[in-house]
Image (tube, rainbow, N blue to C red):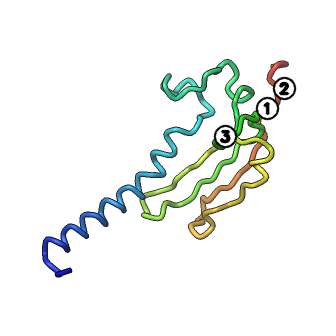
């Protein structure tokens, strides 16, 4: 294949597109994750049963219908240097056990990896 200006421009354009997709992927992933504050969430992203935001949640992992018992949060510096990325998921006990910090190579002063239990049904019923 000959090395022409047109080929080089096409390759550069493809590389720019790949980098743009990599940069935008975490943003799109964050948009579909459940939020703790359901008042600010648009109707199309709310869960079916929003009566009690934490107690009615199901595990965030695909194919898992178990009730969520933990909230996992990781805040890390984005590879592109455009700021911090915060990823949150509510998970069942089994999937929470599988979680661990995955972005330690990007750790910085404000890096966070936190697992917190969600209020149980009995705790929310007495409130």
Q: Relative to the observer, which residue lies in front, 73 or 91?
A: 91
Quick one: quadrant of the N terminus? bottom left
Question: In front of the other: label 3 or label 2?
Answer: 3
Q: Residues within 10 Å of mark 1 (few under 14, many from 20)?
A: few
Question: What residue is disc 1 on?
Answer: 119
Q: Position of residue 82 (x, y in %)?
A: 42, 58
Asked if residue 47 is positioned above or below residue 84 in the image, the reply reads above
The answer to whether 19 appears left or right of 72 in the picture is: left
C-alpha distance separating marks 2 and 1? 6 Å
Q: Secondary structure at mark 1?
A: loop
Asked if residue 76 is positioned above or below residue 53 in the image, the reply reads below
Q: Secondary structure at mark 2?
A: helix
Question: What residue is disc 3 on?
Answer: 63
Q: Residues within 10 Å of mark 3 (few under 14, many from 20)?
A: few
Do the numbered discs 1 and 3 sit on residues whose CB atoms are within 8 Å? no
- Residue at 76 percent across and 33 percent down: it is 67
C-alpha distance separating marks 1 and 3? 23 Å
Q: Secondary structure at mark 3?
A: loop
Asked if residue 42 is positioned above or below residue 68 in the image, the reply reads above
Question: What residue is disc 2 on?
Answer: 123
Q: Position of residue 44 (x, y in %)?
A: 49, 25
Do the numbered discs 2 and 1 sit on residues whose CB atoms are within 8 Å? yes
C-alpha distance separating marks 3 and 2? 27 Å
The quarter holding residue 36 reads: top right
Outermost residue, left side: 5
- Residue at 46 percent across and 57 percent down: it is 83
Badge 1 or badge 3: first in the primary sequence: 3
Quick one: quadrant of the C terminus? top right
The answer to whether 102 appears left or right of 117 in the picture is: left
- Residue at 78 percent across and 40 percent down: it is 117
């Amino acid at each position: 294949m000959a090395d022409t200006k047109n080929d080089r421009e096409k390759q550069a354009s493809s590389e720019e597109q790949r980098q743009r997709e990599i940069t935008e992927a975490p943003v799109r992933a964050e948009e579909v994750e459940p939020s703790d504050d359901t008042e600010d969430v648009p109707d199309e992203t709310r869960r079916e049963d929003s009566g009690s935001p934490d107690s009615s949640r199901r595990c965030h992992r695909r194919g898992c219908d178990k009730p969520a018992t933990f909230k996992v949060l990781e805040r890390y510096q984005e590879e592109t240097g455009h700021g911090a990325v915060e990823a949150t998921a509510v998970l069942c006990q089994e999937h929470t056990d599988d979680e661990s910090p995955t972005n330690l190579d990007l750790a910085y002063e404000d890096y966070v990896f936190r697992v917190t239990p969600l209020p149980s049904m009995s705790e929310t019923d007495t409130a």
